[in-house]
Amino acid sequence: MKQVKVLGSGCKKCTRTVEIIQTVASECGVDVNVVKETSPEAMMSYGVMSTPAVIVDDVLVHSGSVPDRQKVETWLK
Amino acid sequence: MLSLFSDFAAWLIYGLLGLDPDSKLGSSLHFFVEDTTKIFFLLVVMIYVIALARASLNVERVRDYLAGKHRVIGYFMGSLSGAITPFCSCSSIPVFLGFTSAGIPIGITMSFLLTSPLINEVAVLLLLSLVGWKITLIYVSVGVMVGIAGGAFLDIIRAERMLQPFALKAYQSAAPTEGRDAGRQRLSFKDRREFAKHELFDILDRVWKWVFIGVGLGAALHGFVPTSWIEGNLGAGQWWSVPSAVLLGIPLYSNATGVIPVMESLIGKGLPIGTTLAFCMSTVAASFPEFILLKQVMTWRLLTTIFVLLLGSFTVVGWALNAIG
């Protein structure tokens, strides 16, 4: 199972990011565990400076915007 | 070219709706229609064009650039890059920590964060089209100067002592940042267009309601508040009008887009430029929601210091501008 973390201060964009990842995952039938992470320490430890940021299996794959579908699909495959 | 919007508003309000240009309602509605159509037109065109140009500029690059700069240049460049870097206020915490853990002094980071809400391409654009280049120049210089002075002051009082413990630790154990970020590739024109499109929708989504609120307030002032009342009660002669304007601005939380149409109206009504600027900057920069966010990385003592510092500088700038006239 893929571990996905969405880092952000909890604004609208972060919520949308979580939603889109969950939607794409269920459509592709991929098993994921998506967690929202709002603590500043977590952002710092991944060196994230613009949110929302996405961490898949402990690797930073995206930051600064709501990712589009195609991007999410490539992470989950 | 911009008189087109005034003509359109006149045609709609005075012609089609048949309102009297000298009536309160007529002149308010004319102001509202002229400003909203003009602002949205300018926003759509200019955000897109500017976004194309600055697609490759991001906070990571600014951090790498600012790291290791001499202090004096650092405050200036920090403030300036705060003005031009695209950056949403919900990212202030990660940006603050990113700068801090790269060893950039707190003062330079704060120069960036203080100027950022005050000046951005949308604000400059609106100022230029609504109040002219002179006031735009004054506004931008004041915004940059407040950032520089605020940052320098915070380093003088060694503000890093008043950070939350984990943020202080990150600052003290700062490591070089080279090669840490992966997102640095050359952008094709297609990437730039894609970015610009996103940016356009993003910014419009964020500011459209502020445009209506701001222009609505400006229009009401324009039509219903007599010029003589403002001149008589809030003129340059009353020293207390500047600090009151600053205090009044605190609970009124708006961004620069919403406040500039109000500014246009206030200046048109003869409110002195210093008082107007002090009020508008206080509305934009001294907002509680953003300060509460910063609580995650700062102690109350530091937050209060910054807040008082901002209010103090807006007041001083207001007095100075009123005195010069």
Image: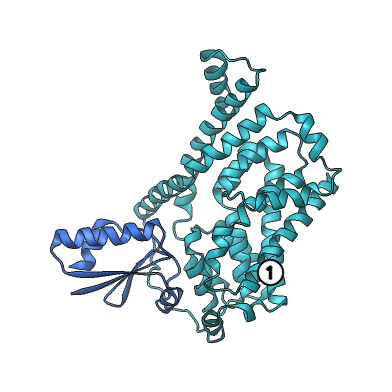
- Taking depth in this image into account, of B257 and B185 the one nearest to the observer is B257
- Taking depth in this image into account, of B72 and B322 the one nearest to the observer is B322
Measured as percent of width and height from the top left, residue B121 is found at 55, 49
Q: Is label 1 in a helix, a strand or a loop?
A: helix
Q: Amino acid at mark 1?
A: Thr
Q: Which residue is mark 1?
A: B305
Q: Spot the cyan chain and give its letter.
A: B
Task: Tell me the colour chain A is drawn in.
Answer: blue
Residue closest to the far bottom: B173
Say above or below: B315 vs B35.
Answer: below
Measured as percent of width and height from the top left, residue B231 is found at 80, 35
What residue lies at 25% left-to-right and 57% top-to-bottom? A69
* Residue B259 sits in quarter: top right
Q: Quadrant of the N terminus of chain B?
A: top right
What residue lies at 72% left-to-right and 77% top-to-bottom? B157
Q: Subunit of mark 1?
A: B
Q: Quadrant of the C terminus of chain B?
A: top right
Position of A12 with respect to A26 (left or right) is right
- Taking depth in this image into account, of B74 and A1 the one nearest to the observer is A1
Position of B319 with respect to B47 (left or right) is right
Position of B239 with respect to B43 (left or right) is right
Say above or below: B202 vs B152.
Answer: above
What residue lies at 81% left-to-right and 49% top-to-bottom? B240
* Residue B267 sits in quarter: top right
Measured as percent of width and height from the top left, residue A46 is found at 39, 77
